[in-house]
Amino acid sequence: MLFMEFSRCCEQLEGLSGRLEMIDVISRELPGLSADELPIFVRFVMGRIFPDYSQTKLGIGPNLLYEAIGYVAGVRKEGVVEKINATGDVGQAVEELLAIKSQTTFFHEELDIVRVYSELNAIALQEGKKSQREKLLAVRRLLGNAHPLEARYLARIMLEELRIGVGEGSVREAIAKAFGVEVALVEHAMQALNDLGEVARLAKLGPDTLKDVRITLFHPVRMMLAQAGTIADMIREHGQIAAEFKYDGSRFQFHKKGNWCRMYSRRLEDVTGALPDVIEKLLGATDHDVIIDGEVIAIKDGHPMPFQSVLRRFRRRHDVAGASAEIKLVPNVFDILYLDGVTLIDLPLSERRKKLDSVINFFVAPQVVSDDQKVIEKTYLSALDGGHEGIMLKVLSSPYSPGQRGRNWIKIKPEVDTLDLAVIGAEWGEGKRAHIFGSFLVACQSEGKLVAISRVATGFSDEQLAEVFDLLKDTVTAHSGKEVTFEPTLVFEIGYSEIQTSPTYKGGFALRFPRFVRIRDDKDIVDVETLESVFDRHQRQSKTGQAPAQN
Ligand code: AMP
């Protein structure tokens, strides 16, 4: 498929607002694509380049891209930034700049999507001192061969934000429609493979190929997530339930084959190098080939340490030995997804647990199974007494649902008056803070879009503001007066006293007394709170007249 054809398809999709029409357009493109093209098209149309399980990162920030655009369009970088600010979109800006330029350029090499992908892959693989320069040259080459319309989508893909409103759900449905397979089958294959591109390729081969999909070792699977709820509701709905401590640490997924292993964080980043002692402990806990799920916590003098100290440890990769002596890291394993070549995610939790108990010799998180509220409450109190966050309640008959925040795992903790929100904008500070950002615009998500819900300016130490500035300064996509807009990359946990309805923000809600609690660098933008759950909290709070309590 020519990149021009892909671009026209994106242009068409961008002009549509109905989800069904979008699914229709995408599903009509898919059957004509070759086995090589299918995965690339599917990822590109969602604004992604590499499979979700992949560790490969493009490594092109807005600044590098703007510089390359400037070069190709024959204007200064500042001119590019001005244009972006005027249009509000890098894609439109580059398209307009190249349209002026291309009247004087006669030669274009035709790009196709396979070539674009392989060039982007080559860019991602550039490492070392000169890599930024090499990346810049490669981006210039790519853009230099692009027609203005192609450049619109190429630039957006490079920032992995296509802005055509196509989410994973629509693409799943389009794949099902294109190849006449059940959506549930596509979803299921996606859960195991964690790459919708590959799923599309297999769907073309027929439903049996999709049914046969297995988890692959060293391709991390998305983590199953939890919702808030109550002990009483869980027992009423399910009778016997499983209760485990809710450990306040960092989620991990550990893959092991023989003596070779890798550990992935909640964001599916490879963190093996940062945790040698945990790796050693887990390697020694089983002779089997496994994928296990758990939470690593930091223990000092027998007590769990706050979450942040574990995170610092993840970050301090260069001082691994020093960090090990300071605090002890202990894995708590609570699930098993794969055992000796067999994918286990469809088994009920009770069966998975039996396997877990029989093949993992140490570090398995204790589990209490009961339908007695008092027994579960006792577990909850002993969790809090032990310095843990609360408990997790799990439905015994439930499968492991990668990436889903369903009602099969329920978290019970004393207070939930915080929300994890995406940082989408900021305002420059004042006085001694004039050179850094002083207040931030934060957003929840709704149908794949980020919806602003609050501004937060309190709760930060000077040190934290400096850290946040460092993390955000290269992600600025637009300026307007004192305001800046970010490419969303960072998640804040925000405390509040109340959720109020408000006309100020599009979502209809605002936070009263918002305060910064911490950076959630274990969370991705897709993990931020949904507008739906903000609505739920608001409902519960209106009933009780206060912030929701959990039990
Ligand atoms: P939250 O981050 O508040 O949505 O809570 C869910 C998180 O709790 C999971 O992603 C895990 O990192 C963590 N967690 C701690 N203990 C457990 C457990 N026993 N089972 C599942 N998740 C747990």
Image (tube, rainbow, N blue to C red):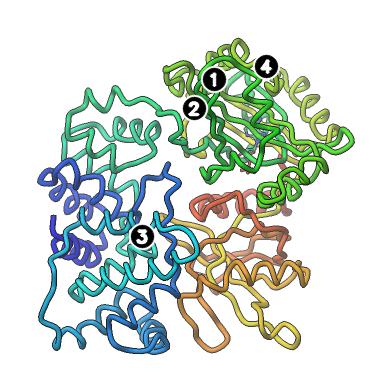
Query: In front: mark 3 or mark 2?
Result: 3
Quick one: label 4 or label 1, which is nearer the N terminus? 1
Query: In front: mark 3 or mark 1?
Result: 3
Query: In front: mark 2 or mark 4?
Result: 2
Name the spot of residue 144 as percent of width and height, x first. 23, 75
Quick one: label 3 or label 2, which is nearer the N terminus? 3
Quick one: label 3 or label 4, which is nearer the N terminus? 3
Residue under numbered circle 2 = 400
Secondary structure at badge 1 equals helix
Name the spot of residue 471 as percent of width and height, x first. 60, 66
Please tell me how crowded label 1 is: few (under 14), some (14-19), or many (20+) other residues with Cα within 10 Å: many
Query: In front: mark 4 or mark 1?
Result: 1
Q: Looking at the picture, does residue 242 appear above or below residue 510?
A: above
Q: Outermost residue, right direction? A: 301
Secondary structure at badge 4 equals strand
Q: CA distance from mark 4 to mark 1?
A: 12 Å
Secondary structure at badge 2 equals loop
Q: Decide: marks 3, 4 in contact (CB < 8 A)? A: no
Residue under numbered circle 4 = 369
Residue under numbered circle 1 = 349
Q: CA distance from mark 3 to mark 1?
A: 42 Å
Q: Quadrant of the C terminus?
A: top right
Q: Quadrant of ligand 1?
A: top right
The answer to whether residue 375 is left or right of residue 107 is right
Q: Looking at the picture, does residue 30 appear above or below residue 240?
A: below
Q: Outermost residue, front direction? A: 129
Q: CA distance from mark 2 to mark 4?
A: 18 Å
The answer to whether residue 95 is left or right of residue 312 is left
Q: Looking at the picture, does residue 548 appear above or below residue 82?
A: above
